[in-house]
Image (spheres, grey):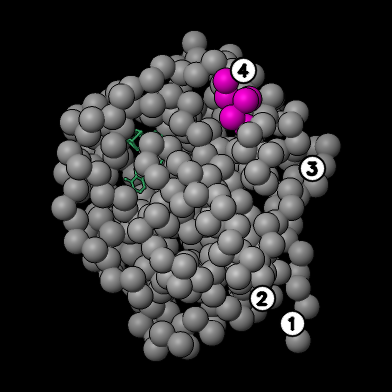
Amino acid sequence: MSDIRHDWRRAEIGALFDQPFNDLIFQAQTVHRRYFDPNSVQVSTLLSIKTGACPEDCKYCPQSNRYDTGLESEQLMEVERVLERARAAKAVGATRFCMGAAWRSPKQRDMGSVLAMVEGVRELGMETCMTLGMLTAGQARQLADAGLDYYNHNLDTSPEYYGEIITTRVYQDRLDTLRHVRDAGMKVCCGGIVGMGENAADRVGLLRQLANLPAHPESVPINQLVRIEGTPLADSEDLDPFEFIRTIAVARILMPASHVRLSAGREAMNEQMQSLAFLAGANSIFYGEKLLTTANPPANEDLALFAKLGIEPEPVHPRRPDLNSDRFAPTRIAPG
Ligand code: SAM
Ligand code: DTB
Ligand code: SF4
């Protein structure tokens, strides 16, 4: 039976979580080795191309205009400034450049600049990713035609907990955007946030939604909440670190061929915790001193950790001329 499945039941996922820790990590590592080089980690650099003043009410977010987080808003950056930052990211070894905007959805008047950013970053030989909020089918096609490789749009949490976190759009809106991205032929980057006061069943529910999408997202960011003063989640309780690692391991088992990204929250993790996440099957990180608006570990610290662990940054996947045939095709590492 193929281990790429889209029919996971809650009880099965719960049973994966509830195994003894060592059994879970062994299973995740075994799956990981069937699909990936275990000593290779993909590195993406993030840039906020439009910051703050967002009309949405996501309770975790420093960029929502509903909360006083002290963040200074910035208008959409000029294309050339974005390309300068992409060149700098490439110079220190990033292979994918992810551009994020604090929008509910892009306005048509902004699409020209956004498309020029995609084309410019692509010309540098980097993979491109954008996260701009909800997309119409037409906007997804425009981005795909400009050569955008990945679109990031997170489900964030389980359908059951979602209403506690965001009220300005519904779960189905997110699923609709993901469908438009897929239909346009782009790769999907989709994950969520843990540590928002959700319970274990919500973490099961989030991973089940991701794994039971018609196709697994090629990239699955698992964010640990970065607590932001002024947001309603500022005083959320710490998630047990082992529960975080279990979430990574279960994501790896459910979506064996996807890159699982150890995303926001690394600033609060020591080297041992990050190493456990890699052992549990994480094989991608955000690289560079800033995420969108908050701190990320400095690049030299990440490179030092990679060197200690014998990890190599993953090279860019070669592009094929036909975008629609450019589906992620991981190299199978022969077991044994
Ligand atoms: N505005 C667009 C949207 O929400 O779709 C794109 C940018 S938004 C900042 C991208 C993602 O960042 C969110 O979906 C959320 O998962 C993550 N994020 C935002 N604030 C975070 C925080 N404080 N901690 C962890 N992840 C966060
Ligand atoms: C994702 O899943 N995490 C990134 C990226 N996709 C866009 C964003 C993390 C944001 C953390 C809070 C901040 O820096 O503003
Ligand atoms: Fe806006 Fe995105 Fe932040 Fe939600 S997560 S408030 S949509 S920037």
**Residue 151 appearing in the image:** no
Q: Which numbered disc, 3 or 2, marks the residue that appears first in the sequence?
A: 2
Furthest-top residue in this view: 109
Q: In x, y percent, where is residue 275?
A: 51, 71
The residue wearing badge 4 is 80
> How far apart, in angstroms, are the residues tagged by discs 2 and 1?
7 Å
The residue wearing badge 2 is 33
The residue wearing badge 1 is 335
Amino acid type, label 2 = Arg
- Range shown magenta: 81-86
Q: Is mark 1 within 8 Å of ligand 2?
A: no
Q: Is residue 200 left or right of residue 315?
A: left
Q: In x, y percent, where is residue 279?
A: 54, 75
Q: Residue at 42% across / 80% down in the picture?
A: 16
Mark 3: give few (<14), some (14-19) or many (20+) Cα within 10 Å.
some
Q: Is mark 3 within 8 Å of ligand 2?
A: no
Amino acid type, label 4 = Glu
Q: Which numbered disc, 3 or 1, marks the residue that appears first in the sequence?
A: 3
The residue wearing badge 3 is 319
Q: Quadrant of residue 10?
A: bottom left
* Mark 2 vs 1: CB contact within 8 A: yes
Q: Which numbered disc, 4 or 2, marks the residue that appears first in the sequence?
A: 2
